[in-house]
Image: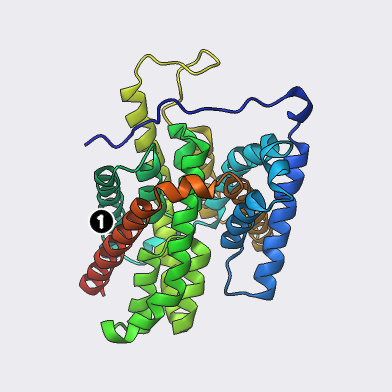
Amino acid sequence: MALLHRPHGVAVRPVSRETSTPWPGLATAAGGALTAWCIHRLVPAVPMLTASVVLGIAMAHLPGLRTFVRGTARPGLSLAGRRLMRIGIVLLGLGLGLDQVLRLGWATVAMVVGVVAATFLGTVWLGRRLGLPGDQPLLIATGYSICGASAIGAVSEVSGSDEEDVAASVALVTLCGTLAIAVLPLLQGPLGLSDPAFGRWVGAGVHDVGQVVATAQTAGPDALGEAVLVKLMRVALLAPLVAAVAFSLRARRRGVRTASGRRPAPVPLFVAGFLAAAALRATGALPDVALEWAHTAQEALLAAALFGLGSAVHLPTLARTGGRAAALGLGAWVVVAGVSYAGVVLTV
């Protein structure tokens, strides 16, 4: 199965020297992240990262602001979507409690690995069958199987995906993950899940960490604790998945060099940073206050990055593949929910 496909003939609008400075866009991304934080504080049920994406999309389409977003602010917003995303992913490793994850047991580890593999491969296959353009099947599969927009950003860095493919994938995965907050709690009773089992199902089947917390907390602290641990286990698979994509690209593009004249690294630097951060967290050397500050910085960086990605969404273009993208989103949702439910039932 060919997992990777690059779009052909992508047109890139040249940026004039007068508008090539990144600072207006970076300041706009920072303002968007701050606004998203305020929204989350006022309405805790709305995750900060979800609000960031929505604000970015909205700003790119408001008549008085879209010219600024697509012109003066574009270099900085694109930079935020790439560079700030990488730094945020590295800091994400500091939130990965490997000791806590392993305490869940090897049966749960095997269940999570199976859910991630089935979701990723099934979504890529379905996306290709539906004819979605560019890297959208790969990126949507990554978002569903690992940790939503953060995982999409990580894989897009090694696949060199077009910015519009990344933005469209983030928008779809964010929308479906947000719907899970409302839908999954309604299914706990009919599916006969105890609170801890419901938490594991949410942790194995919902995309973004914030969405997992918002969904699982409806069933109480036991469900929330299980959900976060299982979710961290999925996050731990981000590095091997990105490395696998990088190795696949390296094999497919053997002999191809980057613009700087060097062959692409088999494992990206930010993935190595993610693993190093997780290893540092496992040593217990960092005090709790440092981990809290790192978590705050991680959320702020990812929020600014996702605002930048959201601002690249062009709704008329997205609408042309909207039906197929919605079908893929629904199909992938059924896969991840069904496989994770079966896994939880077998391992509880």
What residue is shown with label 1?
Answer: 114
Where is residue 183, by image quadrant?
bottom left
Q: What residue type is labelled 1?
A: Gly
Q: Indicate the position of residue 11 as horizontal and vertical percent values.
A: 52, 27
Q: In percent of the image, x 40 and y 16: which residue is there?
A: 256
Task: Determine the residue positioned at 28% across, 64% down.
Answer: 334
Determine if residue 327 is in view.
yes
Residue in the picture at 67% in, 62% down:
36
In depth, the one of 284 and 293 nearer the eye is 293
Residue 90 in the image, given as x and y percentages of width and height = 56, 45
Q: How is the image coloured?
A: rainbow
Q: Is residue 266 left or right of residue 21?
A: left
The percent position of residue 330, horizontal first and vertical second, equals 33, 61
Instruction: Bin the neighbour count of mark 1 within 10 Å (Cα to Cα): few under 14, some 14-19, many 20 and up.
Output: some
Q: Nearer the viewer, residue 12 or 307?
A: 12
Name the quadrant containing residue 246: top left
Q: Looking at the picture, does residue 32 appear above or below residue 105? A: above
Q: Where is residue 333 in the image (x, y as percent from the top left)?
A: 33, 62
15, above or below 179, in the image: above
